[in-house]
Image (spheres, grey):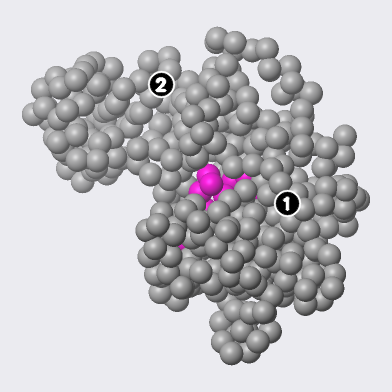
């Protein structure tokens, strides 16, 4: 099975501009393709995972990835999938976020001569002259067509700023620039980027009279149609300082029964033949599938050692032993701490009021015993294990 057929079998392809040409290019390692990442935070998150895995798969098949960091488009902010305008970032924050992205991507993509390259659209977008840009590409865009684009339509009721209205032109210009200077003949992105990507292929056709291609990746949605990658604490980050390897593991270990096999098929690099055998799994076998999913993805993002530690800790929690050395640990300066402070500090509750509610509802255990007294003080001289519900656990120790 060649790479295009594998991508289809894994359910990764949403829309394509020319299936026969795209199949021919990527199956024969002739694609120089790019995916853009706007530096909206100082870490990549699960929402970027599909794109990173796609780049890895295509590179393994002999194609050349161009990683585009949106140091320029980050000044504007993509309105796709948004109901409000993104907050404006300073140039210093954008540069810092770009550097953080680079480090994390090296786990997925092999950079170097004749391998993947990384470019930053700030290098060409920030130097553009507004009048020259209007004359060069402005006539290639129909405002009527732009307003019909899904990414703009959903914003029209609440208001779309002129700043964001320019985003499609900037992204299209990126493709045009990369085509001319790097021979980049294909763009991949999330399915919500389709309109922006078509803008790029059309700009290349109108300005250069040549064909370029676009393909969108299926969005990672759960069985309820909601985007995956969020928890009560917020986004699931790839940076271990923001989401620990154990928390990352637990996120995937706790996906819904209806989602686990889809996630294994779309996100892991396990052979399809092996995954096909799991399609008949039910009951406790699905728990095994969740463990496989969590382990494979944690290994991909954080390495085998961290994946082994997370697996060991998760199994210890499930067995109720609460003794694993690999559990998430939170350190305190003092010999003791109040239960409410411990829960908030260890991020088991967003506030003391919420911590009180959880305790009163019987959802908190200390050293494997239910706690009902909100005034409990925890002795840290020999450590303690605090547990919220069945799955969130943290070891408390004195520094």
Q: How many marks?
A: 2
Point out the tag, 1 or 2, that comes first from the N-terminus.
Answer: 1
Q: Could you give the CA–CA distance between mark 1 and mark 2, rounded to whole angstroms? A: 42 Å
Q: Circle 1: is it few (<14), some (14-19), or many (20+) Cα within 10 Å? A: many
Residue 99 seen: no
Quarter of the figure with residue 32: bottom right
Q: Is residue 304 magenta?
A: no
| Residue 90 versus residue 315 in the image, above or below | below
* Viewer-side residue, 390 vs 323: 390
The quarter of the rendered structure image containing the C terminus is top left
Q: Circle 2: is it few (<14), some (14-19), or many (20+) Cα within 10 Å? A: some
Residue at horizontal 51%, vertical 59%? Answer: 152
Where does the image place residue 92, in percent across and percent down from the top left? 43, 75
Q: Is residue 120 left or right of residue 47?
A: right
| Residue 130 versus residue 9 in the image, above or below | below
Where does the image place residue 390, in percent across and percent down from the top left? 35, 20
Quarter of the figure with residue 268: top right
Q: Which residues are magenta?
A: 40-52
Badge nearest the viewer, 1 or 2:
1
The quarter of the rendered structure image containing the N terminus is top right
Q: Is residue 42 magenta?
A: yes
Quarter of the figure with residue 378: top left
Where does the image place residue 327, in percent across and percent down from the top left? 40, 31
Determine which of the numbered discs, if any, sits on residue 36 in the image. Answer: none
Residue for badge 2: 317
Residue for badge 1: 215
Residue at horizontal 63%, vertical 58%? Answer: 195
SS type, badge 2: helix
């Amino acid at each position: 099975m060649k790479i295009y057929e594998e991508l289809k079998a894994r359910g990764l392809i949403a829309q394509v501009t020319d299936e026969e040409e795209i199949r021919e290019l990527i199956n024969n390692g002739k694609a120089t393709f790019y995916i853009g990442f706007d530096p909206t935070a100082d870490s990549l998150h699960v929402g970027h995972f599909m794109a990173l895995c796609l780049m890895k798969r295509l590179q393994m098949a002999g194609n050349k990835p161009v990683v585009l960091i949106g140091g320029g488009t980050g000044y504007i902010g993509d309105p796709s999938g948004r109901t409000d305008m993104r907050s404006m970032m300073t140039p210093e924050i954008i540069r810092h976020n770009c550097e953080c992205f680079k480090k994390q991507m090296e786990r997925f993509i092999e950079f170097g001569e004749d391998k993947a390259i990384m470019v930053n659209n700030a290098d060409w977008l920030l130097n553009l002259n507004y009048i020259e840009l209007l004359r060069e590409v402005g006539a290639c865009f129909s405002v009527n067509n732009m307003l019909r684009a899904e990414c703009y339509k959903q914003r029209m009721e609440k208001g779309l700023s002129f700043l964001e209205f320019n985003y499609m032109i900037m992204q299209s210009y990126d493709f045009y620039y990369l085509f001319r200077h790097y021979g980049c003949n294909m763009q991949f992105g999330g399915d919500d980027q389709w309109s922006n990507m078509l803008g790029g292929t059309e700009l290349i056709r109108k300005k250069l009279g040549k064909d370029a291609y676009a393909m969108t990746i299926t969005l990672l949605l759960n069985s309820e149609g909601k985007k995956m990658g969020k928890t009560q604490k917020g986004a699931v980050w790839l940076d271990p300082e923001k989401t620990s390897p154990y928390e990352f593991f637990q996120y995937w270990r706790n996906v819904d029964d209806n989602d686990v096999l889809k996630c294994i098929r779309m996100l892991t690099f396990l052979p399809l033949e092996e995954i096909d055998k799991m399609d008949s799994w039910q009951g406790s076998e699905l728990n095994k599938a969740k463990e496989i999913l969590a382990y494979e993805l944690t290994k991909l993002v954080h390495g085998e050692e961290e994946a082994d530690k997370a697996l060991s800790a998760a199994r210890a929690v499930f067995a109720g032993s609460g003794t694993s050395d690999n559990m998430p640990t939170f350190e305190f300066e003092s010999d003791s701490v109040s239960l409410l402070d411990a829960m908030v500090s260890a991020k088991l509750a967003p506030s003391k009021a919420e911590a009180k509610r959880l305790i009163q509802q019987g959802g908190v255990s200390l050293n494997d015993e239910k706690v009902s007294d909100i005034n409990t003080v925890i002795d840290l001289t020999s450590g303690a294990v605090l547990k919220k519900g069945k799955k969130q656990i943290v070891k408390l120790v004195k520094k």
